[in-house]
Image: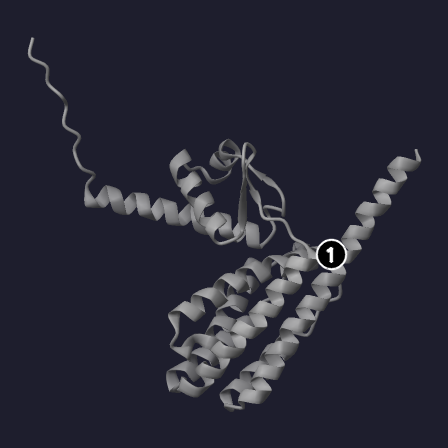
Amino acid sequence: MRAFREARLPSSPASADKTQTLNASVLGRMRADIIACRLMPNERLRVETLRERYRMGTSPIREALMRLEAEGLVELEQNKGFRVAEVSHQNLVDLMRTRIEIETIALRWSLEKGGVDWEADLLGAFHRLSRQSKVEPSRPEAISEAWSREHAAFHSALVAACGAPTLLGIRARLFEQADRYVALSIMSNGPLRDDVGEHKQLMRAALSRDVDKTLELNRAHITRTLDKVAASLAAGQRVVQARAAARRAK
């Protein structure tokens, strides 16, 4: 009997587009959950659990995890699988100091090159941010998704005219990782800052093309975040140590 081998038909463009859309969707949702600490630092990321959470198949889940590992938000341990990247004071300091240096370059170039359209975009970004509450009204321990989105948009608008896509890509990754620490500090019920005032000062200095003042305000803005989050991490560590000591004393 003559054997026939069934030819494999290539995927249609529509099918490929649908797959890419699904992959991008689960990647965006998982990234947002990690940054907002809905998926907590060091939490195990089991594929089956994630399939149920996002209503997606195995392939897009695994692809998203690999992409997030490349971004530094997820870690892969041999024989253990994926987990959300841990947080630490050392990593926080390294991250924030690096962010300051990268944003200093991007801001300087953006203020030098930005035109009228950049000014209008920055004004609009601040207006949208100023209309948002930083925390969810129904969950004061959780950062507002709308605020987080507009906050990222504002800081992106500040540097948007720098004309260096590679630099902007590095800055965006650093900002996302820093946002995760911000979410943790809000969850710790620490005192809220005058975010509107800080961002308004940044916007005004940038629109005035006062490079030195803008850079100093941005450095102070990031340093305040560093100090607040570092205090939150230290407080959390003291709670963990106290609980461990209590268990040993029993």
Q: State how many labels appear.
A: 1
Where residue 216 appears, as percent x and y from the top left, is 62, 83
Where residue 138 appears, as percent x and y from the top left, is 65, 54
Where the C terminus falls, by quadrant? top right
User: Farthest residue in the front direction?
Assistant: 78
Determine the image quadrant of residue 56. top left
Residue at image point 57% right, 88% down: 212
Figure check: 82 above or below 21? above
User: Farthest residue in the top direction?
Assistant: 1
Residue at image point 53% right, 47% down: 74
Q: Mark 1: which secondary structure?
A: helix
Where residue 188 appears, as percent x and y from the top left, is 73, 56
Figure check: 155 above or below 28? below
Figure check: 200 above or below 128? below
Figure check: 212 above or below 130? below
Q: Is residue 35 left or right of residue 248?
A: left
Whether residue 124 is visible, yes or no, is: no
Q: Amino acid at mark 1?
A: Leu
Q: Is residue 35 left or right of residue 157?
A: right
Residue at image point 45% right, 52% down: 28
Residue on which the image places disc 1: 233
Residue at image point 66% right, 64% down: 93
Camera-side residue: 72 or 210? 72
Camera-side residue: 56 or 85? 85
Camera-side residue: 239 or 28? 239
Camera-side residue: 121 or 238? 238
